[in-house]
Image (tube, grey):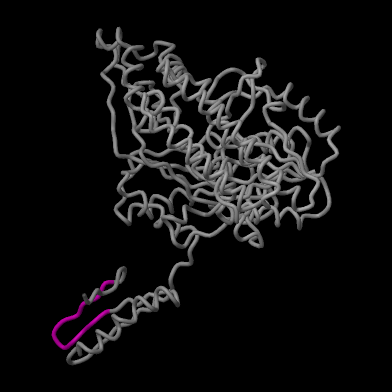
């Protein structure tokens, strides 16, 4: 059995849904669990509805109407007239429930995380119901199944924790009895033991697919998106980036942690436990091979670096003890407990061995909350001047090299920092992760794109061959120099040839044996 997940971009409109149905129709005979996200941007609109209702802004009704019309239009584009009424009435019934929830928020001016989870669930419920019915119209033996009946979680609304023992039991029981070849399920949602709707966090549809795949020991988990796999770098910033054909689970987790958005990070763990390969494919170019995430092939010769990723909008805060506090236990424990309690994600840690200070990297959006809770936690020590006031640095980012062999290759860090240095990119801090599969550096946010391109060129692109051309003449003709200068970029970009030129006449000699001569 295989599990396939289709993201929001893959179900954006009626043509996208037809493309999915056609793709599934061509699959070999077998059993498939199909997990789908909400239509593109629907989840954001649902969140906006709830917030506007909370603010007692009647505009929320207009947004609900837009959501309703969009789904009605898709139904009209996908199904013949005689088949539409049943689907439209099902959508309308749920839209009424959505309106009731938002009206309640409007009346009492209260928006709980529990209510927000219920509101956000409508997007996936609508899309999965429509796709299941469309597959049936294609002649495929397909049914819709509500994921909330299978995936059981705790009651931490907004990002619930899965009860794997109970969920696996429900999933196995269902699929053992179900005879349909295609089961379509909404991603992102589950329920607690009280049957209240919960969500698994943004990107949770990937996670839903991985939970199902792990429970049924699927032969393959396919993640269908709008890119042809995990890339060597962000293609929006690095034009030369290309898909990674194969990658280990650990490398994929590292790239995801440092900002690669192709796959939701928690997705990898359940699949890795059961050694289920994950294939990332492009819905719009299904013939592209994509990226295969699987167990590390240790015998295979791998490149120094598998991929480059990074996180922008990073802030560093430093908590520094004075000499009288050195050696006192519980200092770090208290710091990370308070951050964990406030659900502040720690991206980067620098600790000196004398325990004199600790520097931590977090998202800029969390820094005000972090400053407040840390100052509160250590208020007594700060007042008694055992600890210095929190020092905060803004406008930073983190860039990471990820690779299976990084821990064994000493030249990697040398090449990384030499390359950054030559391009005048200052490194604020460095770290090697506990998995020893990444080397990361904190740099200025303004240098992020430049650093990505610099490192990608260093580790993934062939270095240009240098031709040392030296011209000795009585008089250097401008036309000759202009012709050479015009060809420099062409030779570098197309043929990977770099012309290093020296000039001499009877009076003077000039050359630059590193950069070459710039005639502009």
Above or below, 517 against 504 in this view is above
Q: Is residue 294 visible?
A: no
Q: Residue at x 67, y 16 (%)?
A: 193
Residue 187, quarter of the rendered image: top right
Q: Residue furthest left?
A: 507
Q: Position of residue 19 (x, y in %)?
A: 65, 56
Nearer the observer, 392 or 86: 86
* 504 in the magenta segment: yes
Q: Residue at x 78, y 37 (%)?
A: 217
Q: Which residues are drawn in magenta? A: 502-512
Above or below, 193 against 147 in this view is above
Q: Residue at x 38, y 55 (%)?
A: 419
- Residue 164 falls left or right of residue 405: right
Residue 342, quarter of the rendered image: top left
Q: Is residue 516 visible?
A: yes
Above or below, 74 against 378 in this view is below
Nearer the observer, 167 or 458: 167
Q: Position of residue 159 (x, y in %)?
A: 54, 26
- Residue 488 falls left or right of residue 161: left
Q: Residue at x 43, y 14 (%)?
A: 334
Above or below, 106 against 311 in this view is above
* 327 in the magenta segment: no
Screen quadrant of the C terminus: bottom left
């Amino acid at each position: 059995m295989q599990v396939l997940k289709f993201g929001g971009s893959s179900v954006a409109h009626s043509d996208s849904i037809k493309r999915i149905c056609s793709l599934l129709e061509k699959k070999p005979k077998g059993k498939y669990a199909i997990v789908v996200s909400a239509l593109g941007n629907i989840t954001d609109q649902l969140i906006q509805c709830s917030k506007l209702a909370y603010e007692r802004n009647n505009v929320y009704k207009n947004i609900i109407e837009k959501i309703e019309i969009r789904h009605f239009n898709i139904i009209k584009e996908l199904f013949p007239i005689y088949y539409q009424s049943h689907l439209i009435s099902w959508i309308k019934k749920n839209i009424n429930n959505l309106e009731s929830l938002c009206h309640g928020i409007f009346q009492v001016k209260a928006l709980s995380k529990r209510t927000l989870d219920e509101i956000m669930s409508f997007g996936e419920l609508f899309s999965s119901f429509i796709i299941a019915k469309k597959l049936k119209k294609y002649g495929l033996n397909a049914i819709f199944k509500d994921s909330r009946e299978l995936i059981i979680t705790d009651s931490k609304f907004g990002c619930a924790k899965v009860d794997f023992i109970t969920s696996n039991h429900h999933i196995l029981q269902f699929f053992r009895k179900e005879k349909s070849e295609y089961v379509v399920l909404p991603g992102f949602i589950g329920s607690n033991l009280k049957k209240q709707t919960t969500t698994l966090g943004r990107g949770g549809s990937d996670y839903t697919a991985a939970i199902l795949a792990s429970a049924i020991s699927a032969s393959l988990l396919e993640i269908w998106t709008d890119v042809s796999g995990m890339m060597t770098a962000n293609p929006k910033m690095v034009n030369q980036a290309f898909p990674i054909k194969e990658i280990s689970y650990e490398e994929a987790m590292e790239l995801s942690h440092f900002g690669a958005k192709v796959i939701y990070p928690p997705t990898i763990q359940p699949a890795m436990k059961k050694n289920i390969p994950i294939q990332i494919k492009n819905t719009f170019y299904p013939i592209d091979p994509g990226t295969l995430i699987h167990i590390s092939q240790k015998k295979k010769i791998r490149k120094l670096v598998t991929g480059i990723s990074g996180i922008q909008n990073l802030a560093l805060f430093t908590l520094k003890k004075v000499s009288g506090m050195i050696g006192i236990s519980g200092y770090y424990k208290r710091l990370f407990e308070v951050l964990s309690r406030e659900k502040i994600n720690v991206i980067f840690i620098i600790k000196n061995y004398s325990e004199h200070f600790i520097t931590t990297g977090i998202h800029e959006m969390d820094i005000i909350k972090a400053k407040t809770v840390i100052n509160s936690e250590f208020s007594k020590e700060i007042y008694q001047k055992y600890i210095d006031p929190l020092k905060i640095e803004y406008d930073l980012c983190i860039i990471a090299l990820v690779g299976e062999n990084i821990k064994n290759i000493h030249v990697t860090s040398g090449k990384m920092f030499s390359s950054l240095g030559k391009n005048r990119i200052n490194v604020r801090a460095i770290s090697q992760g506990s998995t020893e599969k990444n080397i990361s550096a904190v740099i200025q946010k303004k240098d992020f794109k430049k650093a990505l391109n610099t490192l990608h060129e260093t580790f993934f692109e062939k270095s240009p061959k240098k031709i040392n051309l030296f011209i000795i003449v009585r008089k250097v003709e401008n036309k000759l120099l202009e012709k050479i200068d015009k060809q420099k970029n062409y030779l570098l970009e197309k043929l990977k040839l770099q012309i290093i030129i020296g000039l001499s006449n009877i009076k003077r000699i000039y050359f630059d044996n590193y950069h070459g001569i710039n005639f502009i």
